[in-house]
């Protein structure tokens, strides 16, 4: 698992920056009813998406929450007075406080199914009756685009999938939520070069390939032989 306090400074630049944030915010808002007045962004990270959610609609009050101190500090510069540092499994808000809740790129990081259930349960708890919960699903599946890098890494050990759509829907249903719609957006700026992929292997980006593992080193060697390293 990455240290998100250490990642905070470079997080936006390494994750597609403003174009990707704009695409994500647009997708989230397409599912949030126009009469919503209070929205909670769970695991808001640096606030790059959260700020766009707040700016896109007059009358929509947006609150961000994140566990990482460094992430929360960055988000606070974008939404002064509207960011709380807290655990998504124990949200510090009353029942039914929000008209809408979103969690973008969170559930795939959960330690296990129990943690997914806890997060979804908390998001459902702070929703008012009839409120909307928007979350991203199937994140890992969206990364494989059939590139030569994907071919090299195709035999790596699979990681656990915590955000499979069917599993998330089942968790949501257990808390009285029903599927109400879906949206898609393109992960802009997420392309990797062979050299960048090697660097990601070295710093533990791939959870099933810890740095220094002989298998990780083997993949790095094969990646280094691909053409056009940058």
Image (cartoon, helix red, strand yellow):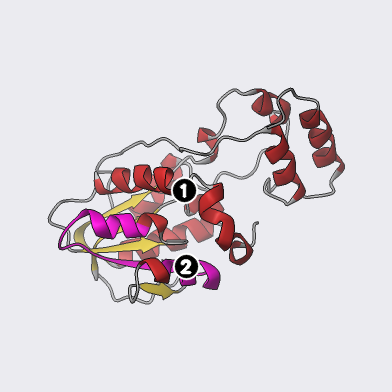
Q: Going by the picture, which residue comes out furthest to the right?
A: 214
User: How far apart are the alpha carbons under marks 1 and 2?
Assistant: 14 Å
* The stretch drawn in magenta includes residue 72: yes
Q: What residue is rendered at 30% in x and 68% in y?
A: 126
Q: Going by the picture, which residue comes out furthest to the left?
A: 35
Q: Where is residue 132 in the image (x, y as percent from the top left)?
A: 25, 54
SS for callout 2: helix
SS for callout 1: helix
Q: Can residue 54 be seen in this view?
A: yes
Q: In this view, does 105 lie to the left or right of 210?
A: left
Q: Give the range drawn in magenta.
A: 50-75
Work out whether 74 lies above or below 159: below
Q: What residue is rendered at 68% in x and 32% in y?
A: 230
Residue carrying label 1: 17
Work out whether 115 lies above or below 137: below
Q: How crowded is mark 1: few (under 14 residues within 10 Å), some or many (20 or more)?
A: some
Q: Position of residue 108 (x, y in %)?
A: 52, 49
Residue 13 or residue 30, whichever sits in front: 13
Q: Residues within 10 Å of mark 2 (few under 14, many from 20)?
A: some
Q: In this view, does 129 lie to the left or right of 90?
A: left
Q: Residue 74 carries which label?
A: 2
Which image quarter: residue 40?
Answer: bottom left
Q: What residue is rendered at 26% in x and 40% in y?
A: 181
* The stretch drawn in magenta includes residue 177: no
Q: Where is residue 49 in the image (x, y as percent from the top left)?
A: 38, 54
Q: In this view, does 227 lie to the left or right of 18?
A: right
**Number of numbered discs present?**
2
Q: Position of residue 195 (x, y in %)?
A: 72, 37
Work out whether 74 lies above or below 140: below
Residue 10 or residue 84, whichever sits in front: 10
**Which of marks 2 and 1 precedes in the sequence?**
1
């Amino acid at each position: 698992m990455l240290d998100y306090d250490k990642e905070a400074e470079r997080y936006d630049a390494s994750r597609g920056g403003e174009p990707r944030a704009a695409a994500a915010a647009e997708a989230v808002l397409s599912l949030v009813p126009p009469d919503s007045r209070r929205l909670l962004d769970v695991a808001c990270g640096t606030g790059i998406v959260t700020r766009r959610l707040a700016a896109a609609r007059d009358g929509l009050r947006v609150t961000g929450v994140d566990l990482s101190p460094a992430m929360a500090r960055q988000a606070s510069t974008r939404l002064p007075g509207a960011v709380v540092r807290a655990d998504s499994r124990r949200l510090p808000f009353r029942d039914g406080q929000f008209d809408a809740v979103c969690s973008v790129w969170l559930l795939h990081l959960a330690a296990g199914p129990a943690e997914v259930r806890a997060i979804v349960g908390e998001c459902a708890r702070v929703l008012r009756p009839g409120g909307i919960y928007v979350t991203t699903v199937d994140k890992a599946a969206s990364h494989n685009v059939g590139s030569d890098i994907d071919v090299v890494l195709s035999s790596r050990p699979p990681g656990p999938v915590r955000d499979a759509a069917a599993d998330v829907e089942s968790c949501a249903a257990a808390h009285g939520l029903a599927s109400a719609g879906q949206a898609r957006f393109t992960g802009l700026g997420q392309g990797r070069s062979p050299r960048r992929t090697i660097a990601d292997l070295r710093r533990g980006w791939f959870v099933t390939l810890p740095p220094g593992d002989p298998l990780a080193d083997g993949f790095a060697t094969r990646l280094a032989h691909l053409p056009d390293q940058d």
